[in-house]
Image: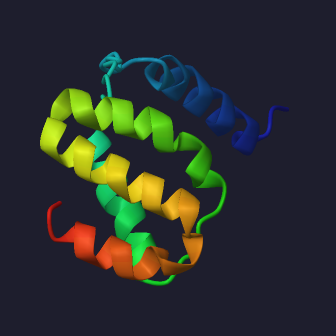
Amino acid sequence: MICMRTVLLALAALLLGPAAGCGPQVKTKVIEIKPDAVGEVRSMLQAYADGQPVSSEASMYDDLVTRLKAVDPDKGEAFAAFVAETRKAPAGVSARAKKLLGKF
């Protein structure tokens, strides 16, 4: 004879099985994130002001200067001067970053 438990499991599978795939469709939305040169520079300057030494991010300086000048020429020029000074003397980066951070 068929066990009552087997009958209940089969009945549950028949009733709940089709419902598992039903429901509203999930819509996918693509969000475009535009790089924020001012925010990137501000974040970098804050890290330097907090004592972080110059490291691999220095390879992005020229790109950041170009992008920053396109958005805000005055800040771009100020950051370009910061970059030039930092390349000459990386040891004083914290003080220079604190000074420049006020403009950002």
The C terminus - image quarter: bottom left
Task: Say if residue 78 shows up in the picture.
Answer: yes
The quadrant in which residue 89 appears is: bottom right
Q: Specify whether 53 is left or right of 78.
A: right
In the rendering, at what x and y percent does residue 68 appear? Answer: 28, 37
- The residue drawn where x is 71% and y is 41% is 4
Q: Which colour scheme is used?
A: rainbow
- The residue drawn where x is 75% and y is 36% is 6
In the rendered image, the vertical position of residue 85 relative to residue 30, given as above or below: below
The N terminus - image quarter: top right
In the rendering, at what x and y percent does residue 7 appear? Answer: 68, 33
- The residue drawn where x is 49% and y is 83% is 51
Name the one closer to the observer, 45 or 77. Answer: 77
Q: Specify whether 23 is left or right of 73.
A: right
Task: Say if residue 53 shows up in the picture.
Answer: no
- The residue drawn where x is 46% and y is 33% is 63
